[in-house]
Image: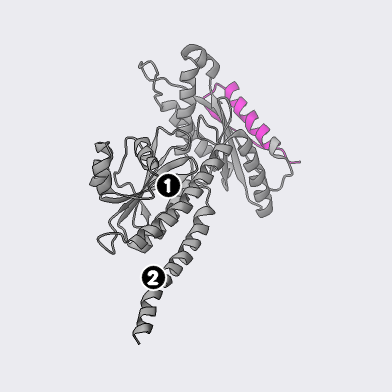
Amino acid sequence: MASGLADQLQEIPLERENQDLKEIIEIAFQITAQLEIENIIKNVVWSLVSRFQMETVSVALLGDLDESTVHVVSYRGLKKEDVGLTLPALQPLLAFLDKDEYSQIPLGYLKDNFPDRDIVDRLARHGIEVVVPLRTDKGAVGVLLLPRSGLSETYSLADLQYVTRIVRFASIAVENAHLFRQATTDRMTGLFSHHFFEKNLDEELERARRYKSTFSLVMFDIDHFKKFNDTYGHLQGDRIIREISRILCKSIRQVDFPARYGGEEFALILPAVDVRGAMVVADRIRKRVESFGFPSMNGGEPLHVTISVGVTEFDPESSYAPSEIIREADRALYRSKENGRNRVTVGKPRSG
């Protein structure tokens, strides 16, 4: 009898370990299938919230194109929400975590050993209990910030083992997402590259033909940009391009496809949008650029530029190639320039 009870007691941790591994494998499939960092974070957070009933969870990452920036994503329960957690820098904390390759650190240890009091105080104000690094072959690239578990006062060793296993897969997924983004993204603007734009346009065209649907293509460039560069310098010109890229991204849906086509020219694919809808989007971008005060690098008055825009819609009954769609949008763009600039012109693709 006593022997049987002892065997049962030994089997309980093994049963939990097996169940945890099953859960982790299922979650790992979901996480590593993603190439968007936001989706990776969402899958990680949802798995931990459902497991530990946490009120909030946050992830802080280095910017994938600019490592001087800190990107903090927070969830309250299962809903993404700004909980007010900001970090002035992440590199000092990552360097500290890399020094002894910690798999996780309680906040109390950070208070006693990490010299940056500002970062520690910010974490403490938001109830962070444990910091878990997202570690790749290049070192730590971000941190998972865990509050107190809703199920207990402290995390057990088994709890922390569960979390660190999830985070290990998340780290691999984040690294893959960074590599994918670097291969498909224009580094200066963060928009998709010319090459990846052409690949996506091919796919969108085939999708539209298959399902007898439509999409629109918007192309625009900055008016008198050569003269602007000659006047203010190329560094100021690069800053204008970056700011316009931000305006573009804030003016569109998540499913849309913004790209830097080349130099000061931009392209935008609008899936399932006809030419009338594309006109609305294009004119919204044009007006926002026109009214925006671009910061001057010499501290002077804000600078202003305008854009000329061309729009065309795909006709699923036509048999033309992607290059013809681009050509027609480009023609419409140049008609905007010929007619005075700072305007949107619609072109219609020719059927083949």
Please name the amino acid that badge 1 sits on: Leu
Image height check: is 275 above or below 22? Answer: above
Magenta range:
324-352
- Image location of residue 288, percent across then percent down: 44, 31
Q: Is residue 243 visible?
A: yes
Q: Is 146 placed left or right of 273 in the picture?
A: left
Within 10 angstroms of label 2, few (less than 14), some, or many (20 or more) residues?
few
| Discs 2, 1 touching: Cβ within 8 Å | no
- Image location of residue 28, percent across then percent down: 50, 58
**Which is more toward the observer, 283 or 50?**
50
**Marks 2 and 1, how far apart in space?**
27 Å
Q: Quadrant of the N terminus?
A: bottom left
Pick out the residue farthest to the top.
231
Image height check: is 58 above or below 158? Answer: above
Find disc 1 in the rendering and name its residue.
Answer: 134
The structure residue drawn at horizontal position 25% and vertical position 50%, both measured from the top left corner, is 127
Q: Is 306 placed left or right of 127 in the picture?
A: right
Please name the amino acid that badge 2 sits on: Pro
> Which of the 4 image quadrants contains residue 290?
top left
Q: Is 141 placed left or right of 107 in the picture?
A: right
The structure residue drawn at horizontal position 65% and vertical position 38%, both measured from the top left corner, is 198
Pick out the residue farthest to the front.
3
Within 10 angstroms of label 1, few (less than 14), some, or many (20 or more) residues?
many
Pick out the residue farthest to the bottom.
1
Q: Is residue 126 visible?
A: no
Badge 1 marks a residue whose secondary structure is strand
**Which is more toward the observer, 19 or 262?**
19
What colour scheme does the image use? one colour
Q: Which mark is residue 13?
A: 2
Specify whether residue 325 is painted magenta: yes
